[in-house]
Amino acid sequence: MTTLADDKLPCTFVIFGATGNLASNKLLPALYHLEAAARLSESLNIVAFSRRDWDTARWREHVREVLAERIKGRTDDAVFERFLARFVYLQGDLNDVASYEGLATRLQHGGVACSSTVFYLAIKPAEFAAVVQNLETVGLNKPRGLNRIVVEKPFGEDIESAHMLNQLLHQHFDEEQIFRIDHFLGKETVQNLLVFRFANTLIEPLWNRNFIDHVQITVAESIGIEKRAEYYDRAGALRDMLQNHLMQLLTVVAMEPPPALEADALRDEKVKVLRSIRPVAKRAVHAHAIRGQYARGSIDGEPVVGYAQEAGVERNSVTETYVAAKFYIDNWRWRGVPFYLRTGKRLAKQTSMIAIRFRHPPQQLFRETPLESVAPNWVLLSIQPEESMRMEIHVKQPGLDMDTRVMQMNASFVKTDEQTLDAYETLLLDVIEGDRTLFIRFDEVEWAWRVVDPILKHWAVEREYIPTYPAGSWGPADANRLFDSDDQAWRNEL
Ligand SMILES: NC(=O)c1ccc[n+]([C@@H]2O[C@H](COP(=O)([O-])OP(=O)(O)OC[C@H]3O[C@@H](n4cnc5c(N)ncnc54)[C@H](OP(=O)(O)O)[C@@H]3O)[C@@H](O)[C@H]2O)c1
């Protein structure tokens, strides 16, 4: 993975929207952990840009409060003070060019000769245009190739708006300056999947249509929409999760080995997968995708309201909070193997996993024994809550009869004395070091939109009705109809 030479490392990290949720929940804890791990260069300053009328002292107070809530275990006082000292707060309006002039002045007089700056857009997508235009107006999009801009999902709300957003970014920044984040790629399991597949010769020969029956990718959330009604009611589960996170997981499961572990080599292979996904024909949308919306129910024994009763949601909203879809990848490796993807809110458990089911043995050798049918083998990769891998293998039970049991071979990625990293720690360090391997190139975004576009378009005109599922369940029972054969079923547990 290519990273920048030390003298090219950025010395300023600007967070637009520093007082927002993303900054508090993800960016500040991740930056603190990088500080604690001594991975931030001494010269790195962090500018917190937001609209509240705060000064740096008030901001540092805020950082203290945020981290006290979110950092488990004791924080080291010396590390904490070093971290706080990196920050300055800049009050400004994203739409006001004078605020950017102030920012430019601050960057010029920041002290050490600054090679480059990272601009992190932790703001609503509606504000992106103002920020990139204003950065150019005051010359902060330069040096080209060095100053970087980090963009969060959602990257557009359909293929057309994704193109427009991309054009806008490219008017002011070169592709190598743009870091599109999909934080699922920063997760240890996802990176480990690359190692599992391409560092183990044991596995790779089995990883194809000859041995694999189907693949399931589940990202289940027990939380509701929290305070994101304004965004979520426009987006829905297909745009919010499936088009980006689940599609990215699919590409990593299905891709061919890249010629090198370099950003473009890896992304080329991911794009090939997306391009090979069989387009869902208009008339086949019903057979390939199902949607649902949570109704009232209970989570962990506590009653919760339905989606349509959530604050900020229209009572007659038909936005989907659950989506399940089936895709086929028409290439030599995967032709005929269904990939089932599902995600939803207010489901029974907070869990994300990739479940790979292998085919039945070609001969039912044990048919005449007490053991009539043998359950298939599974490889399970858990992404959350724990990061682990499990293989299910049959062994004979000791005794006179031919009985078997399923042995679970567990490979936890993390030893008990090791700490897992949050995806944002990995990704922020990569942004700072200029490694784009785990970031999304525009053609990936574009092809992923193409895959889901027929479903989006079909649902956009079917606005009268949406099936519901009780909060706390595994989603609409109708999701079972996606399966190609009777012996396929959703795998809910590891
Ligand atoms: N929240 C998450 O966990 C999450 C996860 C994945 C992706 N994202 C993406 O991350 C981005 C940010 O989301 P968020 O949930 O953090 O949003 P948010 O909580 O609404 O925060 C928005 C931030 O922008 C600031 N802001 C808004 N208008 C401004 C203006 N005119 N001038 C200056 N500052 C302004 C706000 O300042 P005030 O506080 O003063 O209003 C606040 O700091 C979005 O693109 C979202 O889709 C978020």
Image (tube, rainbow, N blue to C red):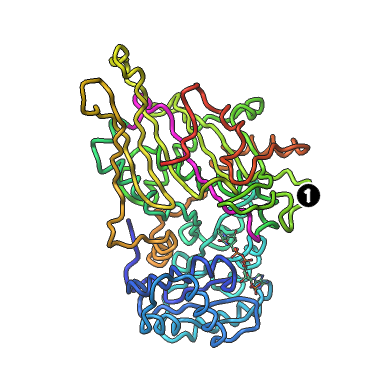
Q: Is residue 226 magenta?
A: yes
The correct choice, above or below, for 11 with respect to 318 in the image is: below
User: What residue did someone put label 1 on?
Assistant: 315
Region rendered in magenta: 207-227
State which quarter of the image contains the N terminus. Answer: bottom left
Tell whether 108 sits left or right of 429: right
**Residue visible at 58% across and 51% down in the picture:** 301
Q: Based on the displayed image, in which of its 4 quarters is residue 451 positioned?
A: top right
Image coordinates of residue 37 in percent, x first then y, are: 33, 71
**Residue visible at 37% across and 66% down in the picture:** 433
Pick the front one: 186 or 117: 186
Q: Residue furthest front?
A: 400
| Dot 1 crowding, Cα within 10 Å, few <14, some 14–19, many 20+ | few
Pick the front one: 400 or 450: 400
Badge 1 marks a residue whose secondary structure is loop
User: Ligand 1 is in which quadrant of the figure?
Assistant: bottom right
Pick the front one: 160 or 37: 37
Q: Is residue 323 magenta?
A: no
